[in-house]
Amino acid sequence: MVVCKKMNTRLNETIDLRHARLSYDIEIPRKGVVSLIGANGVGKSSLLSYWKYNRKLFPGSLSFLDQFPLHPLGDLCLDDLLKVLGESFSLSLKEELKVEGIKSLPLNQLSGGQNQLAKIYTSLSLNADLYFLDEPTQYLDIEKKELLKNLLLRMKKENKAFIIIDHDIDFLKSIEDQRWKMYWKSEKLVELKVE
């Protein structure tokens, strides 16, 4: 059952993930930050992948940041990627994330943290109603985590909505409005509950 309301979207489903069945009855807020936590391997990223390929469940536009690095063929750089995407990317976002120093470097030569920063910039620059971020703090140093936190807090004030998976609980506590937890109910059944 999927019920779209003016303010929020309610999802009540049981779906098959690769390793188990997942059951949930949740309301997707129209604004703010929802953190999605759970043990490694419980299916958080699989759920985001399911939602990515079932976009019709959500009204409005969506942006997804997954865990895979930007490693295109050839020497494509961030500036080239942005031209191909054809979006009007925010100058203030570029300054907030401090990507100026990496925008002309080939993506396949970026470090893990630089690559993650390029992905975050690309994802958050899209004008979406709901952003899904899968482990956005991976590879980021302390300074870049702080920049990301401040950016997300600013976007939250602009009534943007986020669902964020991360294992950095302190980071999540500093930005979340609501927390969801995925846990094993039995060997082959996973549940997602609002905490």
Image (tube, grey):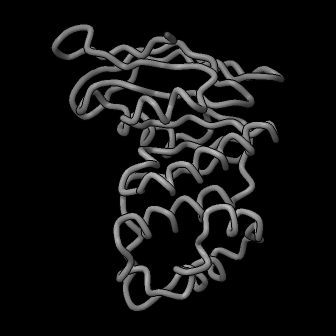
Q: Is residue 81 above or below residue 140?
A: below
Residue 27, picture quadrant: top right
Image coordinates for residue 175, horizontal then vertical, percent: 60, 32
Q: Nearer the viewer, residue 195 or 15?
A: 195
Q: Nearer the viewer, residue 19 or 166?
A: 166
Q: Is residue 94 left or right of residue 99?
A: right
Q: Which residue sits at x=62%, y=39%? A: 56
Which residue reaches farthest bottom? 75
User: How many numbered marks does the figure carry?
Assistant: 0
Q: Which residue sits at x=63%, y=31%? A: 33
Q: Which residue sits at x=68%, y=61%? A: 96
Image coordinates for residue 112, horizontal then vertical, percent: 35, 66
Q: Is the N terminus in the top left, top right, bottom left or bottom right quadrant? A: top right
Image coordinates for residue 101, horizontal then vertical, percent: 55, 81
Residue 109, picture quadrant: bottom left
Q: Nearer the viewer, residue 118 or 60?
A: 118
Q: Is residue 158 above or below residue 110?
A: above
Q: Is residue 66 left or right of residue 38?
A: right
Image coordinates for residue 132, horizontal then vertical, percent: 55, 42
Q: Is residue 64 left or right of residue 129?
A: left
Q: Is residue 37 above or below residue 161?
A: above
Q: Which residue sits at x=62%, y=81%? A: 84
Which residue reaches farthest left? 187
